[in-house]
Image: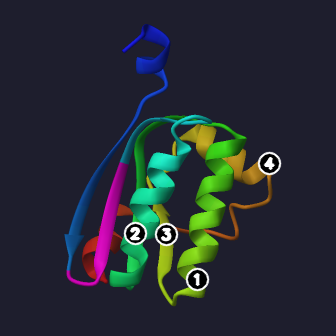
């Protein structure tokens, strides 16, 4: 893998507990790797009532990545599944704020994952 490809890599760690699935995203959610997130999470929607995207280790998101998260939100909502975001970094919060999407997504804290 080239150095540029490695710097753009996205890794996902999926943990399912009951009706809740937590997907921990690490790296960069950008053009070229966004399909990985979409295919992984969209495949989880039918069997989940709640999906939490943990963005703790997400260092960057471009407009393609943002579009992917919006597509997942719409797909989940259409299927009766809740898609929530947790641990938004400052840059991700700013991106969601500038695009007026911060209010669209439910953002939760670590405590809320265990309590629901």
Is residue 57 among the parts visible in the rendering?
yes
Q: Are marks 2 and 1 in contact (CB under 8 Å)?
A: no
Q: Are marks 4 and 1 in contact (CB under 8 Å)?
A: no
71 relative to 55 in the view: left or right? right
Q: Residues within 10 Å of mark 3 (few under 14, many from 20)?
A: some
Q: Nearer the viewer, mark 2 or mark 1?
A: 2
Secondary element under disc 4, as helix, strand or loop, is helix
- Residue at 59 percent of width and 70 percent of height: 73
Q: Is residue 19 magenta?
A: yes
Mark earlier in primary sequence (2, 3) = 2
x%, y% of residue 21?
A: 31, 70
Q: Are marks 2 and 3 in contact (CB under 8 Å)?
A: no
Mark earlier in primary sequence (3, 4) = 3
x%, y% of residue 6?
A: 40, 19
Residue sitting nearer the eye, 90 or 78: 78
Secondary element under disc 3, as helix, strand or loop, is strand
Q: Nearer the viewer, mark 2 or mark 3?
A: 2
Placement of the N terminus among the 4 image quadrants: top left
Mark earlier in primary sequence (2, 1) = 2
Placement of the C terminus among the 4 image quadrants: bottom left
Which disc, if any, is residue 43? 2
Which disc, if any, is residue 23? none
- Disc 3 target residue: 84
Secondary element under disc 2, as helix, strand or loop, is helix
Q: Is residue 76 above or below residue 80?
A: above
**Magenta stretch prevailing secondary structure:** strand
Mark earlier in primary sequence (4, 1) = 1
**Over which residues does the magenta segment extend?**
18-24
- Residue at 42 percent of width and 63 percent of height: 41
- Disc 4 target residue: 98
- Residue at 38 percent of width and 85 percent of height: 49
- Disc 1 target residue: 77
């Amino acid at each position: 893998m080239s150095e540029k490809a490695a710097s753009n890599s996205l890794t996902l760690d999926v943990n399912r507990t009951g009706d809740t699935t937590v997907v921990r995203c690490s790296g960069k959610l950008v053009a070229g790797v966004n399909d990985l997130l979409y295919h992984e999470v969209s495949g989880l929607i039918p069997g989940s009532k709640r999906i939490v995207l943990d963005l703790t280790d997400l260092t960057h998101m471009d407009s393609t990545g943002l579009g992917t998260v919006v597509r997942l939100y719409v797909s989940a909502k259409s299927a009766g599944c809740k898609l929530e975001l947790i641990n938004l970094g400052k840059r991700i919060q700013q991106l969601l704020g500038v695009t007026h999407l911060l209010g669209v997504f439910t953002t939760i804290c670590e405590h809320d994952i265990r309590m629901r």
